[in-house]
Structure formats: C-alpha cells, structure tokens
Image (cartoon, helix red, strand yellow):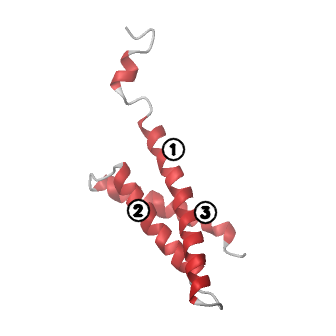
C-alpha cells in the first residue's frame, strides 16, 4: 500500500525515458512502444504476481492478472499518446479542412 502513490510517477518516468531513448535512436514508432509495454508488463507481473505464499498455480494466476492489467492499461495509454502526438501532422486530413484552401 505504501508504494501505490509512487508507482504511477515511476512508470510515467520509465515510459518517458523509453520514448526519449527510442526518439534519440530514430526508432520511435508504435510497434516499439508496444514492445516496451510488453516488457514492462512482464516485469510488473513478475514483481507483483510471483511473490506469493501460496502455490505455483496461484503465483501464475497473479502473474497473469497483474501482467494483463498492466499491458492493457499501458497499451491504451500508448495508443492515445500515439494518436494525440500525430494529430495535426497528417497532411491529407489537413488539406480537407475548410478554410485552408
């Protein structure tokens, strides 16, 4: 419970750093961002799901739940970021707007 207020800013900083590194290498695209989400989801699933006092079955269920929820939420964030980052940069949409032409 004590780590919850710090979890979102830490994840946001990690994702911002990943975006900066990918941008610096010229590899910033949607596929690479989703691969980063997958890696972060696997790490979150291992960190939160595997340390359990119960059996292997419960550990795998916890891994799947935490990893799946993390992948879902990060993927939605990446899709919205990708859409908003490219909003207004599509020339075909810009040419069809009234008053431009």
Q: Nearer the viewer, residue 78 or 67?
A: 67
Point out the tag, 1 or 2, that comes first from the N-terminus: 2
Residue corresponding to mark 3 = 8
Disc 2 designates what residue? Answer: 36
Tell me where residue 55 appears, x and y as whole percent.
61, 90
Distance from label 3 to label 1 (Cα)?
Answer: 17 Å
Mark found first going from the N terminus, 2 or 3: 3
Q: Is residue 88 above or below residue 69?
A: above
| SS at circle 2 | helix
Q: Which mark is residue 80?
A: 1
Nearer to me, 20 or 71: 71
Q: Quadrant of the C terminus?
A: top left
How far apart marks 2 and 3 lie (CA) works out to 16 Å
Q: Nearer the viewer, mark 3 or mark 1?
A: 1
Query: Is 94 located above or below residue 61 in the figure?
Result: above
Question: Image quadrant for the N terminus?
Answer: bottom right
Q: Give the total of numbered labels.
A: 3
> Residue at 34% across / 49% down in the picture?
29
- Element on which disc 3 rests: helix
Marks 2,3: beta carbons within 8 A: no
């Amino acid at each position: 419970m004590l780590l919850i207020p710090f979890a979102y800013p830490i994840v946001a900083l990690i994702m911002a750093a990943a975006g900066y590194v990918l941008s610096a290498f010229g590899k910033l695209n949607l596929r690479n961002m989703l691969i980063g989400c997958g890696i972060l989801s696997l790490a979150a699933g291992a960190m939160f799901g595997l340390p359990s006092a119960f059996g292997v079955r419960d550990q795998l269920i916890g891994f799947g739940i935490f990893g799946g929820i993390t992948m879902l939420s990060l993927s939605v964030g990446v899709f919205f970021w990708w859409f908003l980052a490219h909003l207004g940069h599509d020339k075909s949409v810009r040419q069809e707007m009234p008053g431009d032409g």
